[in-house]
Image (tube, helix red, strand yellow):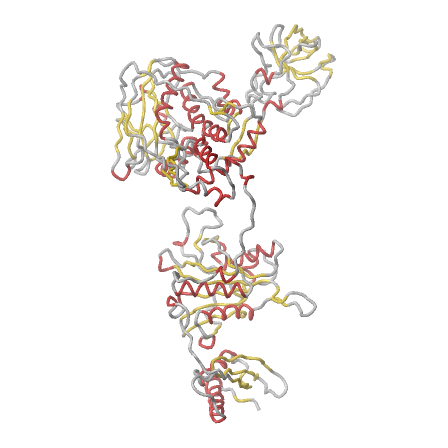
């Protein structure tokens, strides 16, 4: 949103400097992105009078001019055909820079005649794109010696303001001035509004024709006919105002509507009555209808778009662009001026479908003030009568202005509670009043009514923000956030389901193991998704927020590896992350699955003099995975670890697939594939694990139940010689299978190949943890158990007890 300082001051009475205004706007959240002051590059160019212009003795097209600068007479050699005695021109003196090409002027000889500067054209001053070869000619009353930039009114800074999508009211100069006035930097001027009395009935009537589903598309539509107008160029002041904000002057009638849009944030349109067929009706479009718009393009319409139609069909796309066939020209003598309120969502539907982007659409999409529909019609009517003459009809109206105000229960004490700023209640109410709000009530809680132009105010916290930005964010007292204890972060409550309580326990466990919980996007790029297999087209998002986030994630692993890569790149090479969230295999609810995923990277044991530095490996991430499974009620001894069905994304041979039964894969752990790490330029290695929570038995029933047991545990060590190809997991399961009631855990503490071990064999040393539950075991019981273990290993693996 661009706004010149002089235009802003038509609404704001202020003596504040440009710097103070910019600072205040930034404080209000209306960030001034750039200030363009064309007067700076034109400073020093003076108005002069040409006293004489004699032909150059050595060049037919050159003239030697004597010019009066107000202080002295200088000799200037000029090639312009209109350089002659008696005219007022603009002179650049030696030492100045020509804005259009950066040339530095200097005293020089041209064909042997000394010249002390240059008389300039509009092109050379950067004020025109059309070069006619002539110098600027000013009226005879132009004061000699005055800076041209001051005379032409070009010393008017242009503020380029970033308006956030929620502040549609500030897409008009009035809205910006209103916000500034609320800070006390100036006073908001009243808008001189006089109702224009019509002198005849409008020959064009209005109707709204919407079905029950689209009643809100255009709640109100005003209009009137103005006859006897003379359409031509706008006056210089209006052209200058529009040009200052980047708008091209078209004609007086069109310029008036553009002025209203930029001044009050209220788009309007004007039709040539002679080109209309009958009356106007506002309705939804119909299939296969067409409209040729002002950009000379023909669009095919449908039922999602608002149209203004006459008896022949659409003549305008509501809220977006007018039709070419009903547009005004220099021949127009009778016009229909419209001012309407179009609902944002319907303008968005039409604009996006047809890919039409206009200033009008931009404003309607962000919300305009419905209560300005009638006043702007009167203001525009008066302006047309002043510039183009004519006579106005009585106003015609269809519908009623919608009530966009809201009633919010607000406790002024929230400003201190939420914003950490202590203000008297009277000051808070003063700020809200200056912003156009009204209030009722005298107790702790008052009822605040928001203004019709503020569609973004809906809850009490919005009012707190309004008070803070007007009072100044620099008044907020900075305080550290309280640091909760780990057990408080993941503490279960009675309101949580058993399953949710289990997940909180898992979070607490992983946090205690040095991992940080993060939350990532539910989307990934197509390239990332391709790393994990074929992408289901139903997972592709039609309108992604970014092309790097166009696929619903098939796994959480990709985002966590990316987070690890980012951490390493930012100089944090050691750590771990985990996340609990949904992954997607299809577009239906049944195709999404809750998963717990974690990654580790960097050093597992930091470098210090007491211990050797060690990078994390597969066994570290396996420990994280199995500790979590154990907490969720899944004993490590009751699952199988295989390398079958290994998912892509993991390093083959350095990962394990965790199964319960032959088909139910409940988890995966291992080293991340180097190709995946290369995708993010990740140095080092990364380990990861996944637990598919909804595949766990009784996953929704909460944590495991605990049983009482005798407090006399025992341990016994075994060493078995088996074939080299037998995995350790198979031996562990064989030991557990011998007696699952007594043997609660089995761990491998040594694997050996070498002397005293036959070729093709290896030795596994294990510890069996024995937990009696109902009686203390005697020697005979233990020997019987040992025999069962040896026999079970022989039966399952062919292994024999090492002698």
Left or right of residue 235, residue 222 in this image: left
Q: Residue furthest front?
A: 443
Does residue 515 lie above or below 186 as drawn? below
Q: Nearer the viewer, residue 210 or 67?
A: 210
* Image quadrant where residue 168 sits: top left
Residue 236: % across, % down: 49, 16
- Residue at 56% x, 89% y: name it: 802
* Image quadrant where residue 252 sits: top left
Does residue 435 lie above or below 487 as drawn? above
Work out which quarter of the rendered image holds the C terminus and state it.
bottom right
Residue 747: % across, % down: 53, 79
Q: Please state the total of marks drawn on the protein image.
A: 0
Residue 444: % across, % down: 41, 41
Residue 81: % across, % down: 60, 11
Does residue 651 lie above or below 467 as drawn? below
Does residue 723 lie above or below 236 as drawn? below
- Residue at 62% x, 24% y: name it: 40
């Amino acid at each position: 949103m661009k706004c010149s300082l002089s235009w802003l001051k038509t609404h704001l009475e202020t003596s504040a400097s440009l710097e103070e205004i910019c600072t205040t706007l930034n404080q209000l959240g209306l960030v001034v992105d750039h200030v363009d002051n064309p007067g700076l590059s034109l400073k020093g160019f003076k108005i002069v009078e040409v006293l004489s212009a004699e032909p150059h003795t050595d060049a037919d097209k050159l003239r030697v001019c004597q010019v009066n600068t107000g202080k002295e007479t200088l000799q200037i050699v000029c090639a312009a055909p209109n350089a002659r005695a008696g005219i007022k021109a603009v002179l650049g003196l030696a030492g100045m820079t020509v804005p259009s090409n950066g040339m530095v002027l200097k005293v020089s000889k041209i064909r042997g005649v000394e010249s002390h500067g240059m008389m300039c054209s509009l092109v050379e001053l950067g004020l025109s794109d059309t070069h006619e070869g002539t110098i600027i000619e000013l009226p005879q009353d132009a004061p000699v010696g005055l800076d041209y930039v001051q005379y032409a009114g070009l010393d008017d800074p242009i503020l380029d303001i970033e308006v956030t999508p929620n502040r549609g009211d500030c897409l008009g100069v009035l809205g910006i001035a209103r916000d500034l006035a609320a800070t006390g930097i100036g006073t908001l001027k009243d808008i001189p509004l006089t109702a224009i009395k019509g002198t005849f009935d409008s020959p064009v009537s209005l109707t709204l024709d919407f079905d029950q589903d689209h009643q809100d598309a255009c709640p109100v539509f005003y209009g009137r006919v103005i006859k006897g107008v003379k359409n031509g160029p706008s006056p210089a002041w209006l052209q200058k105002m529009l040009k200052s904000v980047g708008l091209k002057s078209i004609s007086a009638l069109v310029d008036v509507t553009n002025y209203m849009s930029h001044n009050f944030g209220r788009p309007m349109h004007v039709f040539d009555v002679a080109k209309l067929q009958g009356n106007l009706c506002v309705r939804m479009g119909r299939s296969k209808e067409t409209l040729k718009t002002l950009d000379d393009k023909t669009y095919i319409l449908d039922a999602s778009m608002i149209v203004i139609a006459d008896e022949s069909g659409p003549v305008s796309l509501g809220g977006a662009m007018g039709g070419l066939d009903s547009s005004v020209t220099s021949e127009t003598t009778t016009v229909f001026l419209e001012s309407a309120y179009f609902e944002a969502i319907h303008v968005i539907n039409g604009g996006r479908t047809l890919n039409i982007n206009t200033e009008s659409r931009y404003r309607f999409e962000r919300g305009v003030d419905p209560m300005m529909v009638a006043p702007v019609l009167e203001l525009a009517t008066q302006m047309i009568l002043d510039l183009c003459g004519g006579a106005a009809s009585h106003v015609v109206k269809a519908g009623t202005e919608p009530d966009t105000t809201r009633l919010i229960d607000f406790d002024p004490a929230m400003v201190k509670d939420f914003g950490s700023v202590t203000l008297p209640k009277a000051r808070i109410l003063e700020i809200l009043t200056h912003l156009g709000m009204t209030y009722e009530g005298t107790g702790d809680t008052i009822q605040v009514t928001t203004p019709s132009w503020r569609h973004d105010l809906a809850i009490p916290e919005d009012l707190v923000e309004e008070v803070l930005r007007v009072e100044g964010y620099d008044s907020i007292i900075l305080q550290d956030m309280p640091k909760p204890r780990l057990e408080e972060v993941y503490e279960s409550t009675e309101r949580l389901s058993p399953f949710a309580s289990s997940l909180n326990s898992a979070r607490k466990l992983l946090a205690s193991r040095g991992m940080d919980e993060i939350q990532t996007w539910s989307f990934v790029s197509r390239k990332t998704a391709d790393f994990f297999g074929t992408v289901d087209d139903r997972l592709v998002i039609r309108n992604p927020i970014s092309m790097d986030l166009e696929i619903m994630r098939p796994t959480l692993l990709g985002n966590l590896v990316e987070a690890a890569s980012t951490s390493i790149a930012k100089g944090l090479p050691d750590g771990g992350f985990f996340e609990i969230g949904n992954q997607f295999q299809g577009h239906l609810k049944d195709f999404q699955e809750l998963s717990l995923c974690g990654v580790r990277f960097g050093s597992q044991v930091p470098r210090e003099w007491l211990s050797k530095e060690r990078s994390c490996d597969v066994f570290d991430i396996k420990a994280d995975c199995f500790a979590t499974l154990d907490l969720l009620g899944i004993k490590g001894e009751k699952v199988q670890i295989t390398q079958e069905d290994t998912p892509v994304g993991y390093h083959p041979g350095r990962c394990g697939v965790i199964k319960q039964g032959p088909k139910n894969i409940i988890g995966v752990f291992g080293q991340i594939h180097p190709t995946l790490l290369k995708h993010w330029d990740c140095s080092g290695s990364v380990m990861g694990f996944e637990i598919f929570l909804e595949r766990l038995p009784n996953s929704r029933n909460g944590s495991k139940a605990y049983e009482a047991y005798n407090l006399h545990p025992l341990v016994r060590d075994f060493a078995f010689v088996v074939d080299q190809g037998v995995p350790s997991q198979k031996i562990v399961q064989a030991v557990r299978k011998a007696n699952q009631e007594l043997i609660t855990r089995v761990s491998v503490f040594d694997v050996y190949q070498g002397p005293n071990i036959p070729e093709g064999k290896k030795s596994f040393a294990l510890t069996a943890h024995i937990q009696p539950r109902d009686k203390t075991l005697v020697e005979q019981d233990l020997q019987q158990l040992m025999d069962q273990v040896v026999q079970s290993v022989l039966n399952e693996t062919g292994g024999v007890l090492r002698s």
